[in-house]
Amino acid sequence: MMALKNYTSQVSASRSISLIEDKLAHHGARQILKEYTADGRVACIAFIMHINGIELPFHLPARIEACEKVLKAKVRRPNKATYKRIHDQAERTAWKILADWVDAQMAMIELAQVDVLEVFLPYLFDRAKRQTFYQALQTQGFQKALPAFCSVTESKGGD
């Protein structure tokens, strides 16, 4: 099995967040803000992009808990101190991966391989429902939202 990307990153979460904010601002994002968890950690970067004359809100979450769960599952002999280190590492890893992803997406935008909406559409945020476009698709069953030309057949292999 391949090693997980950035699973040993020593880049602080705040540094990765700053890099993301800089990239977003450089590419036209407005009103960049951070949303925090109850324990004071940044959970999400929210921002506005003007696309075709429309202000569109986006939310980019760092799914730290999911990252932590994966990292904990890889520990052979866990103890309390190890779990604390994993908790901190998960935050660094989740944000570093997101920073790398944003950097790669912005490079593709700069090279006219994709446009902003193509990249960030899953993260388009419905303020009234407090959910992203992707979360809305999950909630209502994404098959209903697929275009007719897609001709989807249900998988029997559990995929």
Image: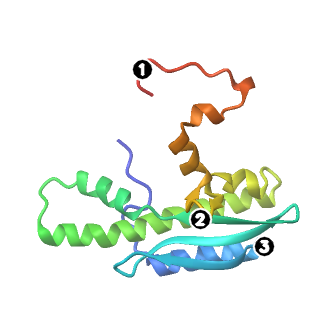
> For the residue carrying disc 2, how many other residues have a C-alpha within 10 Å: few (<14), some (14-19), or many (20+)?
many
Quadrant position of residue 148? top right
Looking at the rendered structure, the secondary structure element under dot 3 is loop
Tell me the amino acid under the disc marked 2.
His
On the image, numbered disc 3 is attached to which residue? 28
> For the residue carrying disc 3, how many other residues have a C-alpha within 10 Å: few (<14), some (14-19), or many (20+)?
few
* Residue 157 - label: 1
Picture quarter with the N terminus: top left
For the point 20% across and 67% down, the residue is 83
Which is more toward the observer, 45 or 76? 45
For the point 75% across and 24% down, the residue is 149
For the point 24% across and 51% down, the residue is 73
In front: mark 2 or mark 1?
A: 2
Q: Position of residue 23 (x, y in %)?
A: 68, 73
Tell me the amino acid under the disc marked 3.
Gly
Tell me the amino acid under the disc marked 1.
Gly
Q: Position of residue 37 (x, y in %)?
A: 40, 75
Which callout, 3 or 1, points at the residue further toward the start of the chain? 3
Which callout, 3 or 2, points at the residue further toward the start of the chain? 3
Q: Position of residue 87 (x, y in %)?
A: 29, 69
Marks 3 & 1, CB-CB < 8 Å contact: no
Query: Distance from label 3 to label 2 (Cα)?
Result: 15 Å
On the image, numbered disc 2 is attached to which residue? 59
Query: Distance from label 2 to label 1 (Cα)?
Result: 32 Å
For the point 48% across and 81% down, the residue is 14
In front: mark 3 or mark 2?
A: 2
